[in-house]
């Protein structure tokens, strides 16, 4: 596959903004990157490249941010989420489409209601330990993601209830790093031609790193309430886009 100069220019700008969002909040780049890359190239390539970029961005943030690097909380949740995603994909292959659609509708309603509640309640002022409950939530979020395509938002909704916005950024970066590494390994095993996706990853890498640097600097200057509002906005938009994509695909 060849990449035109016009398409590369567009995707580089998108990578800058998408991973600027990642640097600010710890999650959300696929919300911008995957839809645009799918239109410019194709969806399998976009998803594979997004997974690889999520892994490199998580690794870069972990390597450069002592707060992310020095703790371990979140890695167990990430592993549980990866296992849950595999289970959800298996379940999806057996359940009727009407059941999958009902799960999606329920996930959308719960997600939007949780966003509203989070804004009414305000940001958490003191973080609590995740413990085994965090692992259970990660597993559940993975299963929901495997069935509906919405995996990050359920996790963030829970983390908003137990972590301050800045601690959420730290923990969700660890969680999604584990999940991204598992996704990349899966693509390497399953996909026959991963070369174009890896090439696109390398092309986007410099702009990704610049975006992460700018977003990370911005996060240090952002108040807890503002960061919580940004997190909620990203969750709401993710849920609505997932619902829209599912409806669009069902019509096709």
Image (cartoon, rainbow, N blue to C red):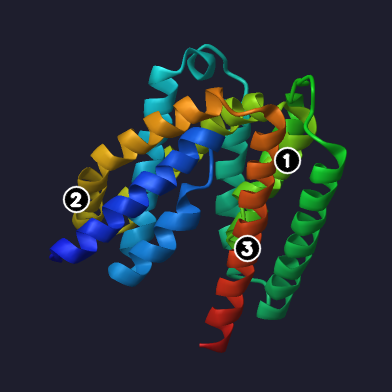
What's the residue at 32%, 34% (across, down)? 209
What SS does tag 1 mark?
helix
Between the residue at mark 3 and the residue at mark 1, the CA separation in whole angstroms equals 15 Å
Question: What residue sits right under mark 1 in the picture?
Answer: 137
Quadrant of the image occupied by residue 104: bottom right
Other residues around mark 3 within 10 Å, as few (<14) / some (14–19) / many (≥20): many
Q: Are marks 3 and 1 in contact (CB under 8 Å)?
A: no
Is residue 139 in view? no
Query: Which of these two is toward me, 72 or 35?
Result: 35
Decide if residue 169 is in sight here: yes
- On the image, numbered disc 2 is attached to which residue? 199
The structure residue drawn at horizontal position 82% and vertical position 56%, both measured from the top left corner, is 113
Give 42 or 181, whichever is nearer the viewer: 42
Q: Is residue 118 above or below residue 244?
A: above
Quarter of the rendering occupied by the N terminus: bottom left
Mark 1 residue crowding within 10 angstroms, few (<14) / some (14–19) / many (20+)? many
Q: Position of residue 230 (x, y in %)?
A: 63, 43
Image position of 25 (left or right of 204):
right
> Would residue 232 appear left or right of 214 to someone viewing this image?
right
């Amino acid at each position: 596959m060849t990449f035109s100069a016009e398409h590369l220019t567009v995707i580089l700008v998108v990578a800058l903004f998408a991973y600027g969002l990642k640097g600010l909040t710890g999650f959300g780049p696929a919300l911008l990157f995957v839809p645009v890359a799918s239109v410019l190239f194709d969806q399998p390539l976009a998803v594979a490249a997004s997974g690889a970029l999520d892994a490199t961005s998580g690794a870069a943030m972990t390597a450069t941010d002592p707060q992310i690097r020095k703790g371990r909380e979140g890695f167990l949740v990430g592993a549980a989420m990866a296992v849950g995603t595999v289970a959800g994909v298996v379940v999806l292959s057996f359940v009727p489409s009407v059941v999958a659609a009902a799960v999606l509708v329920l996930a959308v309603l719960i997600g939007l209601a949780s966003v509203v509640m989070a804004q009414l309640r305000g940001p958490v002022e003191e973080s609590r330990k995740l413990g085994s409950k965090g692992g259970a939530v990660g597993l559940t979020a993975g299963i929901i993601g495997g069935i509906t395509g919405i995996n990050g938002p359920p996790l963030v909704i829970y983390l908003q209830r137990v972590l301050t916005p800045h601690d959420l950024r730290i923990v969700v970066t660890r969680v999604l790093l584990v999940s991204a590494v598992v996704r990349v390994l899966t693509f390497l095993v399953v996909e026959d031609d991963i070369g174009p996706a890896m090439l696109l990853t390398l092309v986007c890498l410099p702009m990704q790193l610049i975006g992460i640097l700018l977003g990370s600097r911005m996060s240090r200057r952002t108040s807890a309430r503002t960061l919580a509002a940004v997190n909620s906005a990203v969750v709401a938009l993710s849920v609505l886009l997932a619902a829209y994509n599912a409806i669009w695909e069902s019509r096709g």
